[in-house]
Amino acid sequence: MSDQSICLIYFSGTEVTKTYAEVIKATLTDIECVVRLFDVTSYASRQKPLPVDDFNAFIFGFPVFSDFAPSVINTWLPTLKGKGKPCAQFFTYGARTSGYAHFHTLQLLETAGFQVLLSAEFLGRHTFNVAGWQILPDRPDQADFAIAKEYASLALERFSAQTPPVFNIQKPFGYNQTLAAREKQPKRSERGWTNPVRVTKACSMCRDCEAECPTQAFNADSGLSEPAECIDCMHCLYICPDEVIEIDKRMKDTYEGFKASWNLTETMMEAKQSKIIEESWQAAS
Ligand SMILES: Cc1cc2nc3c(=O)[nH]c(=O)nc-3n(C[C@H](O)[C@H](O)[C@H](O)COP(=O)(O)O)c2cc1C
Ligand code: SF4
Ligand code: SF4
């Protein structure tokens, strides 16, 4: 029986990150760790304090949204009190790039007082597949899960080590400039193609879209999302039991332009592999 009690915290709009979190939990549970999952996708879930004292170690899993973990996560992480406890981080991404997520999140976790020992990036279907894109529709697959299981075992090994190897991540090129530009970016004031809308007045009014939105952007009464707050995570579309929330149908047509602007092909994206970043010298792609 392992003496590790692990807290696995994740954000997941369309269940890619959630699926990896469950695979990691199952792997650790098989080697007799106690693992508790914390889904911090909804706004409400991030208002409760995290019971840091109840756990020996932490795993944080987030999707990459425009080269970083979701903005709400970047705001929330520095409010935690890590108390020097060990942690590992992982990211899921839709085959373009994990961008600055490894480096930036590591800085935030360290600022919060965690000791980051490991990172990883796992491939998954792109969020905008819900609107007709076709990026990695069949990922994660068994090969991705095999890497996630390896990551779970390595994380446990590091959490249990008396003196774990020092882990760090090199600052990526252009990081300071990108961060400065993001901070200056004004909030969106107009409704864009990625802002969800309920397309009928007739729905069962379960209010899940409102309760589970990460930013309190969706209004179940009006059926509209607030453009300034919406982070385009597609969680409301994904969870609506009546399947009546949509984004602009023309979003589908942006897929060819997306690939062209990044010089990406489906073959290139399919060839990408999930990977563990275990040594400080391993640059994230
Ligand atoms: C707003 C937004 C931005 C995204 N930005 C990126 C990106 O920069 N690079 C990438 O490869 N995938 C990107 N994706 C795709 C997601 O990272 C990917 O589909 C992820 O696995 C979704 O996980 P989830 O279902 O747990 O939310 C983005 C998705 C959204 C919604
Ligand atoms: S989640 Fe769907 S069914 Fe429930 S209130 Fe929102 S739009 Fe209606
Ligand atoms: S309204 Fe926007 S932020 Fe809220 S769940 Fe829907 S897509 Fe995500």
Image (cartoon, rainbow, N blue to C red):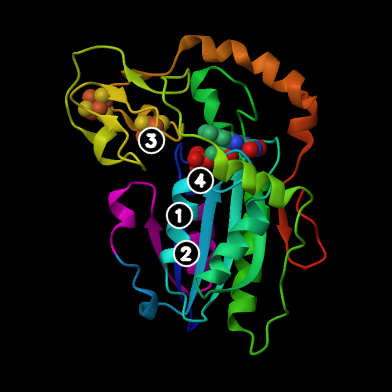
- Residue 140, position in %: x, y? 61, 40
**Residues at marks 1 and 4, CA–CA distance in whole angstroms:** 9 Å
**Residues at marks 3 and 4, CA–CA distance in whole angstroms:** 12 Å
Which mark is first along the chain, 3 or 2? 2
Q: Which residue is mark 1?
A: 75
Q: Quadrant of ligand 1?
A: top right
Q: Is residue 97 visible?
A: yes
On residue 70, the disc is 4
Q: Quadrant of residue 163?
A: bottom right
Q: Is residue 280 above or below residue 84?
A: above
Dot 2: what SS?
helix
In the rendered image, residue 103 lying in the magenta stretch gets the answer no
Dot 4: what SS?
loop
Q: Which residue is mark 3?
A: 229
**Residues at marks 1 and 2, CA–CA distance in whole angstroms:** 7 Å
- Residue 74, position in %: x, y? 50, 54
Q: Quadrant of residue 271?
A: top right
**Residues at marks 1 and 3, CA–CA distance in whole angstroms:** 14 Å
What segment carries the magenta color?
20-48
Dot 1: what SS?
helix
Q: Is residue 263 above or below residue 55?
A: above
